Amino acid sequence: MNEFQRSMMSKQELEDLLCNRARPLELNKIIAGYEISDNAFSEFFFFDGTPYFYHISRVAKIIVAELDIIDSDIIIASLLHDYNKIENIISKDIIEFNFGPYLVFLVELLSLTTEEASAISRNFAFDKPDSFKLPFDDYLIIKLAEQVDYFRSFKFGLNYNPIANLQRLNQQMLPLASSSSNPSVIKLLDEIKQLRNKIIG
């Protein structure tokens, strides 16, 4: 296990990153999302014993610290992006009650393949009181941030094969992501390409 894999973003670090940037109500929602995720994933570990929540928190950190995103929906969804692991612990009703229907929609979207998510979300726009959401961009940001963390964290071994992971990305997600004009998606694609070059030498 490398040093990066042992790292995580603490709740205080998240608060510090968002201090004076996110509105107080949005910050409270994000911190609640962090706490819910931390509790829900507390019993899950990777093959090497690393707490699964470390990965979850790092994905959220990429989104906040590296992409400079303060959108509460994207941050909270990143903290719940592997919802299929915890759906018996936290119901979608709880998610909707705390964070609204768009969060439920986005969390469900994250459980789909890229092709499935694209087919649904490209034909669907979600109205919020103060904005017009584009679900597929949010989906791609979280999915690509997740891959960035995997490539940074895990060394090649029996339990993790980055080459196979890259092949899946090249066949499925990257072609669709490459057509996006979203600056955060473009930045993540560039980072994945740099990490890919390091992996394949």
Image (cartoon, rainbow, N blue to C red):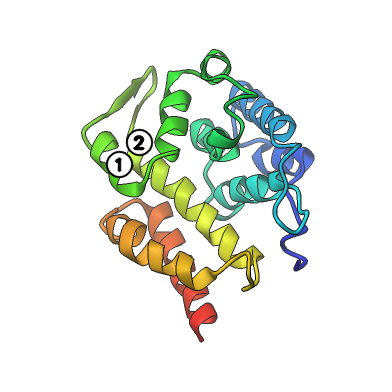
Looking at the rendered image, the quarter that the N terminus falls into is bottom right
Disc on the earlier residue, 2 or 1: 1
* C-alpha distance separating marks 2 and 1: 13 Å
Q: Position of residue 86 (x, y in %)?
A: 61, 31
Q: Position of residue 168 (x, y in %)?
A: 39, 63
Single out the mark in the foreground, 2 or 1: 1
Q: Is residue 136 above or below residue 174?
A: above
Name the secondary structure under disc 1: helix
Q: Residue at x 73, y 47 (%)?
A: 45
**For residue 37, side relative to residue 136 (left or right):** right
- Find disc 1 in the rendering and name its residue: 116
- Find disc 2 in the rendering and name its residue: 135
Q: Residue at x 44, y 68 (%)?
A: 166
**For residue 81, side relative to residue 113 (left or right):** right
Q: Residue at x 46, y 60 (%)?
A: 188
**For residue 63, side relative to residue 101 (left or right):** right
All told, the count of numbered labels is 2
* Front residue of 103 and 89: 89
Q: Which mark is residue 44?
A: none
Q: Position of residue 127 (x, y in %)?
A: 32, 21
> As shown in the figure, which amino acid type bears the numbered disc 1?
Glu
